[in-house]
Image: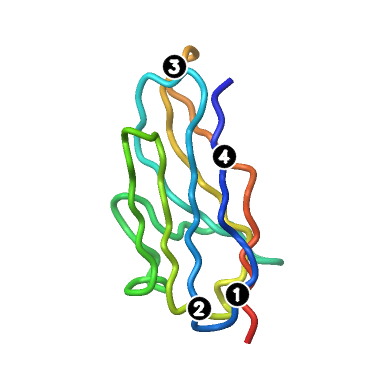
Amino acid sequence: QVQLVESGGGLVQAGGSLRLSCAATGNIFAINNMGWYRQAPGKERELVADMRTYADSVKGRFTISRDNTKKSVYLQMNSLKPDDTAVYYCAATLYGSSGWKDYWGQGTQVTVSS
């Protein structure tokens, strides 16, 4: 069964750092774009970063990276602000036994205290 497994969320003070990890598991033959989204309470889910772009609100503070050998994507988050508080979701387009499909991780909570 193909899935995305996330880790690395938590509680941090403003100005601190966190690193999120996401690994694609299962029978995967190819990976297209991988990225991170977030959803704050009462707000719509928004793109944080993928391999092509960053949200304006995180430019210069967040860095996305990918390790193809591990089928993983990471999000290094520095200079965190309370506005970064949200559930963060990994997303990817993967080619498995059922062809190309879009997948989402289960979400990991990031809470930034002021």
The residue at 48%/26% (across/down) is 101
Residue for badge 2: 16
Q: Quadrant of residue 34?
A: top left
Depth check, front residue: 16 or 57: 16
Q: Which amino acid type is shown beneath numbered disc 4?
A: Val
The residue at 63%/49% (across/down) is 107
Q: Residue furthest left?
A: 52
Q: Position of residue 20 (x, y in %)?
A: 50, 56
Query: How far apart are the alpha carbons under marks 4 and 2?
Result: 24 Å
Residue for badge 3: 99
Q: Residue furthest right?
A: 42
Q: Position of residue 114 (x, y in %)?
A: 63, 87
- Residue at disc 3, secondary structure: strand
- Residue 12's tag is 1
Mark positioned earlier in the residue sequence (4 or 1)? 4
Query: How far apart are the alpha carbons under marks 1 and 2?
Result: 6 Å
Q: Residues within 10 Å of mark 4 (few under 14, many from 20)?
A: some
Q: Which amino acid type is shown beneath numbered disc 2?
A: Gly
Residue for badge 4: 5
Q: Residues within 10 Å of mark 3 (few under 14, many from 20)?
A: few
Q: Which amino acid type is shown beneath numbered disc 3?
A: Gly
Depth check, front residue: 50 or 13: 13
**Quadrant location of the N terminus in the rendered image:** top right
Q: Residues within 10 Å of mark 2 (few under 14, many from 20)?
A: some
Mark positioned earlier in the residue sequence (4 or 3)? 4
Answer whether labels 1 and 2 touch (C-beta < 8 Å). Answer: yes
Q: Position of residue 5 (x, y in %)?
A: 57, 39
